[in-house]
Image (spheres, helix red, strand yellow):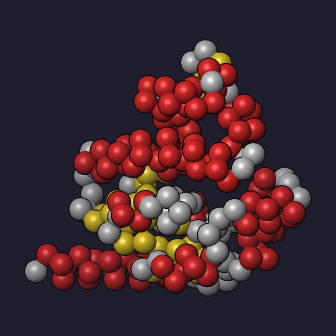
Amino acid sequence: MTRIGITGGIGSGKTYVCQLLKQRGIPIYHCDDEAKLLMTESPVIRKKLCKLIGNEAYNGQELNKPFIAQYLFASEDHANNINAIVHPVVRQDFLQWTKEQNSHIVAQECALLFESGFQDTVDFTIEVYAPQSLRIQRATQRDHVAPEHILARMAQQMDEEEKRRRADFCILNDGTTDLDAQLDLLLAQLNKEITQKTK
């Protein structure tokens, strides 16, 4: 089995690219969605979050999202504290998930692929890239927020050019370049790499 990691900045369209890959029969593990689920369901995360920020982290069985967000966005150190609790559990969950898939290629969608060190859980990394102006336009329309809010979130993530440099492959999602053609080429290249490795 070959694992690929899909990343990209806010508004890059990585989720849409993942949908296209899923249509091609590739199972997708969405890190953000699974992290939210695990923060509610994992006893390990629950215990450590309560120890870190208090029992107010939960309302009964439900995650106290406003309280968590208030702590999370207060400082970079706070975000790192949360990530140090959540990321290891998500990592193990992804590795377990891969064992349950019946596919020779599986994919992980992860906005913080490089920042979290999750590139170590995959064989190839793919950056979905779009110009910043287009990313801002997409994100403001999707999230119904001001461009300044999107820029502030972008500033907290790794620079897109750095992600592009680190990635094994790049998919250009600028609204004009054919995504299907790029993905077909990408999968052909991946299958070629896989074949060479198994010889």
Frontmost residue, 84 versus 24 = 84
- Position of residue 135 relative to residue 189, above or below, is above
Is residue 11 left or right of 34 when viewed as pictured? right
Q: Identify the residue at image location x=71%, y=80%.
A: 131
Q: Residue at x 57, y 60 (%)?
A: 111
Place of residue 91 in the rendered image (x, y in percent of width and height, measured from the top left)? 39, 49
In the rendered image, which quarter is residue 81 located in?
top right
Any part of residue 19 in sight:
no
Which sits in the foreground, 192 or 125?
Answer: 125
Residue at point 75% right, 38% down? Answer: 70
* Residue 59 in the image: above or below residue 151: above
Q: Quadrant of residue 184?
A: bottom left
- In the picture, the quarter occupied by the C terminus is bottom left
Number of numbered tags placed on the structure image: 0
- Of 152 and 50, the residue lying toward us: 50
In the rendered image, residue 37, in percent from the top left (x then y), is placed at 52, 35
Image quarter of the N terminus: bottom left
From the viewer's perspective, is residue 54 above or below residue 122? above
Q: Residue at coordinates 74% horizontally, 76% vertically from top-left? A: 132
* 183 over 103 or under it: above or below: below
Q: Position of residue 75 (x, y in %)?
A: 72, 50
Residue 55 visible in the picture: yes
Looking at this view, name the residue that lies furthest to the left. Answer: 199
Q: x%, y% of residue 195?
A: 19, 79
